[in-house]
Image (spheres, helix red, strand yellow):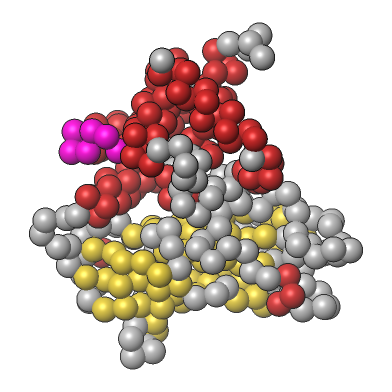
Amino acid sequence: MRFAIVSRAWRRLRQNSALYVMAAGLGVLPVACRDSRPLEAGRPVASRPEGGMPSAQSEPNTNPGPKLTLAVNDSMESEGFRGAPFFVELGLFHPGLYRSGAAREPLLVASKEGLWTAAVRLKVQNEKGEQVAWPWQLASPPSGTLKLGVESPQRLVWWLTPEVTTAIAEGRYKLTAELETGDTTVAGAWRGLVVSQSASILVRAAPTPLSAAQQSVKYQNLVRYQLLRGDRKEAFRQVDEWLKAQPDNPRGFEWRGDLLAQDGKTKEALEQYNNALLAFLKKHGTKGEPATLLLMKRNKMMAELFPDKP
């Protein structure tokens, strides 16, 4: 019965061919469920903050640089509780992604200082417009230059520790990212300056008690934080605590499935993905937005376990 329900959901996703092709080709989630995608440091993905891709019409006609998208705590407008980890994600997209007739050769991004990420700056302003310095940590910094392809966007992830955010004054902060490579000496590299759209975060004390949604975000961020630190044992423990507190939360099951899949435990991961799909269907029914990425993960585990089954 469980597999029948899940299989019907998968067939429903395949029927929506446009959504399926986009998700399979770029790893993108519908806005309604993209927050459930685990954050993996250093993995090139087509991560899109709320508001979608920037319009191609905004691209300059000469020497276009990468398109930048910025999100803080998974959104362009978010809140963060003091004492919780904060995350910033910067997406870099090839300028020819949505430009018909544009050059589609890989764009070489380099910095004068060796690591191309040295050309990226995160800027934070408080409500008075003053620049403030937050000690961001870059997850798994790439080395050398970046060859940015049309079909291989890049993501950078930074985080702040709970100890750091505890000391941040309450208020709203605006964040922007800049990529400036005008001083690079690498032959064939793009030279110029591009600036992302701004994102904002409202920093405040955590309410007591947390709402169900806030509690879900709390655990999700703690799992992400432990993975970025490289502590998988603690990440598993946080998922277990999450599902004890919210036993019907599909994201908790999905995260457990992701961790098991990364450990090569395909059968156990499939069970967790099926649990997540059942919890999702119980919560949302079959008329809403499909759990696109979750279904794809489940199908991948099925293909690995039953390679000869159509």
At 49% from the left edge and 59% from the top edge, which residue is drawn?
Answer: 89
Q: Residue furthest left?
A: 208
Q: Nearer the viewer, residue 258 or 290?
A: 290
Residue 248 painted magenta: yes
137 lies left or right of 23 = left
Asked whether the viewer can see residue 17, the reply is yes
> Which part of the image, by quadrant, shows the N terminus?
top left
Give residue 120's quadrant in the image.
bottom right
Residue 252, percent across and down? Answer: 32, 37
Q: Residue furthest front?
A: 287
Q: Residue furthest bottom?
A: 128
Give residue 281's quadrant in the image.
top left
Give residue 248's quadrant in the image.
top left
At 54% from the left edge and 13% from the top edge, which residue is drawn?
Answer: 305
Residue 196, percent across and down? Answer: 57, 73
Residue 207, percent across and down? Answer: 14, 63
The kind of secondary structure the magenta stretch mainly shows is: loop
307 lies left or right of 203 = right
Q: Which of 85 and 49 is in front in this view?
A: 49
Note whether 260 is above or below 179 in the view shown.
above
Residue 257 painted magenta: no
Note whether 223 is above or below 198 in the view shown.
above
At 63% from the left edge and 10% from the top edge, which residue is drawn?
Answer: 309
> Which part of the image, by quadrant, shows the C terminus?
top right
Q: Which residue lies furthest to the right in this view?
A: 101
At 40% from the left edge and 73% from the top edge, which residue is drawn?
Answer: 200
Q: What stretch is highlighted in magenta?
A: 244-249
Note whether 147 is above or below 205 in the view shown.
above
Residue 131, percent across and down? Answer: 39, 84
Q: Which of 286 and 188 is in front in this view?
A: 286
Asked whether the viewer can see residue 276, the reply is no
